Image: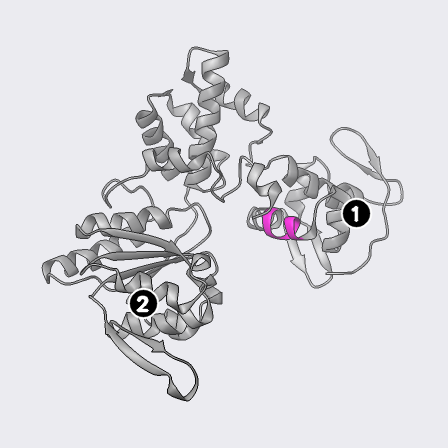
Amino acid sequence: MTFEDEERLVSPQPLEEDNAAEGALRPHSLDEFIGQQRVRSQLGLVLKAAKQADRSADHVLLSGPPGLGKTTLAMIVAAELGVPLRISSGPAISHAGDLAALLTSLQPGEVLFLDEIHRLARPAEEMLYLAMEDYRVDVIVGKGPGATAIPLELPRFTLVGATTRAGLLPGPLRDRFGFTAHMEFYDEADLELIVARSADLLGVQLDKSGAAEIAGRSRGTPRIVNRLLRRVRDYAQVHGDGTIDRQTAQAALALFEVDEDGLDRLDRSVLEALVKSFGGGPAGLSTLAVAVGEEPETVESVVEPFLVRKGLMMRTPRGRVATAAAWEYFGTTPDAFGGSGNTTRAGQAVLPIEVDEEG
């Protein structure tokens, strides 16, 4: 995550302020969990079968973009099974010995949650294969010809892995999970229920129109909807009586530069450069990044995914291209672009510019 992403209100990545807030707002059971109906139903069946048979549940892999509730579901798995939860992450396990120490300290039936499991070190990953399948690890003692492998038996446990990059998981690791679920972005109806539940837990007066306004700008992500709610709550306390309606939500989010489509300042800067400066493209990634004063990695990993999902930008072999929706966003059309200039909503003329074809 870049420094720019750490400051963005609409970043799906967890910010420092989210740590305490998310803990208070997390659901603690599948019945409380809103949205992801398919995943909830399938996971509920897996957990109920394990409890009825009095055995540890199959290993669970949760994939999908950040902010959709993978960590929350891991906590719910442990709560539903009535067992302890151990939390770690792929980047935190840099050696096979780190994983061995973690696995041998598990209690029978315990749930081990590994976030960003695709970033696990290769030696640790290979050790995990044996642990998941045979509940055993081999610890190597000594070096060279005299090295000895000492097998250590592990208690049966349930591994819950979470990843935002399922394609980076090697096949042998992915195949060892008994249940795999992909988390989808939420629709506005579910987000309205989430923001209403969060407002109730925070003691905030929120009417239906205010909930709809916040949900509509949250990019289909519960983490963002809760973050926007906290900022709108602050605005309502300072500039009103603490009640959030549509007008209050609109004023608060306008102050924080989050528009009706969920775009913030950085999103609009990139899109505006593509449409106004480069005539809709194609424009190379580095060219576009220079135009907005950002690093190419920031534009590619932080901004572009949402613009592409929103249908405002396309990635092509020749570069980034604005869609018809992007032109409409700025109140103009690609047909208007020509030698006489392109007229935007503000009536500004922009002449065509030659661009390179870098990717």
Figure check: 101 above or below 216 = below
Question: First in sequence: mark 2 or mark 1?
Answer: 2
- Mark 1 falls on what kind of element? loop
Residue 158: quadrant of the picture = bottom left
Q: Is residue 20 magenta?
A: no
**Where does the magenta region start and end?**
297-302
Q: Position of residue 211 (x, y in %)?
A: 41, 27
Depth check: give the residue in front, 268 or 224.
224
Q: Would you say the magenta stretch is mainly helix, strand or loop?
A: helix
Residue 278 bears which disc, if any? 1
- Mark 2 falls on what kind of element? loop
Q: Residue at x 72, y 40 (%)?
A: 272
Residue 177 bears which disc, if any? 2
The kind of residue tagged 1 is Phe
Q: Position of residue 270 (x, y in %)?
A: 69, 43
Q: Position of residue 84 (x, y in %)?
A: 22, 51
